[in-house]
Image (tube, rainbow, N blue to C red):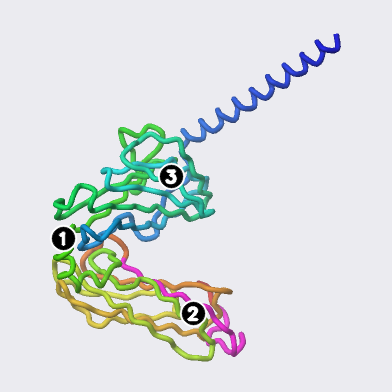
Amino acid sequence: MRKLHYLIKFLISVIVAVSFISAGTLEIAEAARATSGKVAAYRGVEHDWGYINIKGGNLQHTFSMYNSGEDTLLLKGGFTSCGCTKLSITLPDGSKSPEFGMTLLNNWIGLVKPGENFKVTLDYDPLAHGPKDLGPVERRAYLITSAPHDDRLSNRMQVVRNGTVTTFRISGVVVSQEEFKKSGLVNRYKNAMGDFSFRDIEYDFGVLKQSQGITRYGFPFIYRGAKPITITGTPTSCGCARASISKEKFNPGDEGILTVEFDPNLHKEPEGKFFKTISILTDLPQKERVEVRIWAEIDEDLGHDAYKLKEHKD
C-alpha cells in the first residue's frame, strides 16, 4: 500500500513538471510570435568601404543599434544575400550570437530591454568568389526581430513569417592589389560616412585638467561624392564643444579638416569618461549621418565654483 502511495505521488510530480515545461514552451513560442520593442540605429544601416583590396582579407563593419521601444525586443537571428557575407549580433551583456549566412532557419533568440544597445556586425570576404571577381559590390544582410512593421527600419518580408526584417547594406569597389596601392590617397581614409571618409571618427583627449584651457583636435577627411558640395553647418551635441571646417565648398576628391574645440571649464561634466558628437551638414542629402566623437574625462583641479556655467543640462 505504501509503495502504491509513493508511486501515485511520483506520477503526480511528473505530470506537474510536464505541465510547467509545456507552459514555459508555450510562453516562449507566444513571445516569439508577438510584436514588441522597436529597432533604432545610431548611425544608419549602410556602409561603403570605398576601394577594397581583393587580397586584403576579410572586412568587418559594426552597426550600433538600440531598442527605442517600451517593451523587450527579441532578436531572432538573420541571414545574408550571399555566402561571402556573414552577420553576427552582440547583445547588451557582451555575449555574441552564432554567425548567420544565407540559411534562413535558426533557433537563436536574444533579448534587448528598452533603451539597451546592441551591435550588428557584417563580415565580408572579397576573395570568396575568386581572384577575378572585381568591380562594384553590394551585399545585404537581414536582421529578424519582434519589432512591429514601421516602413522604416522594420519591414515585412515574404520569406520571414515570425517577425520583421531590418536590412543592412555594405558596398565598395573590389580592385586588384596593384590598383589598391595606387589608390592610396582615398584609402588613407578608412571610415566612410555618406560621401565623406575620415582617417578617424573618434578621438580621446584622455584626462583634461579643468584649468588647461580650450583643447583642439583636427579630423582629416576626404570628400568622395560625385558632385561639388557645400558645407552648411558643423553642429555639436553640447555648447562645451565647437567645430569649424577648413573650407566651405568641396569638389570630388578634395581633402579637408574638421577641427573640434573643447572647453573643459565651461560647465560640470558627467563623472568619468564621456563623449560629445560633432556633425557635418551639407546642401546635398547624405545616406547616413556624418558624425565624429570626442572623448574626455575632467580633473576638477579648480573646483566646482570655477565653472563658467554653474548650472547645465545636456
Q: Disc 3 marks which residue?
A: 98
Q: Which quarter of the figure is the N terminus placed in?
A: top right
Cα–Cα span, label 1 and label 2: 39 Å
- Say what amino acid the circle numbered 1 marks: Ser
Give above or below for 17 relative to 205.
above
Q: Disc 2 marks which residue?
A: 206
Q: Residue at x 23, y 66 (%)?
A: 195
Is residue 59 found left or right of 24 in the rendered image? left
Element at label 1: loop
- Label annotation for residue 176: 1
Crowding at dot 1, Cα within 10 Å, few <14 / some 14-19 / many 20+, comes out as some
Is residue 268 found left or right of 257 in the rendered image? right
- Say what amino acid the circle numbered 2 marks: Gly
Crowding at dot 3, Cα within 10 Å, few <14 / some 14-19 / many 20+, comes out as few
Q: Are marks 3 and 1 in contact (CB under 8 Å)?
A: no
Residue 290 is situated, as x and y percent measured from the top left of the image, at 31, 67
Cα–Cα span, label 3 and label 2: 35 Å
Element at label 2: strand
- Specify the quadrant of the image occupied by residue 218: bottom left
Element at label 3: loop
Q: Which residues are magenta?
A: 290-311
Cα–Cα span, label 3 and label 1: 31 Å
Q: Residue furthest top?
A: 1
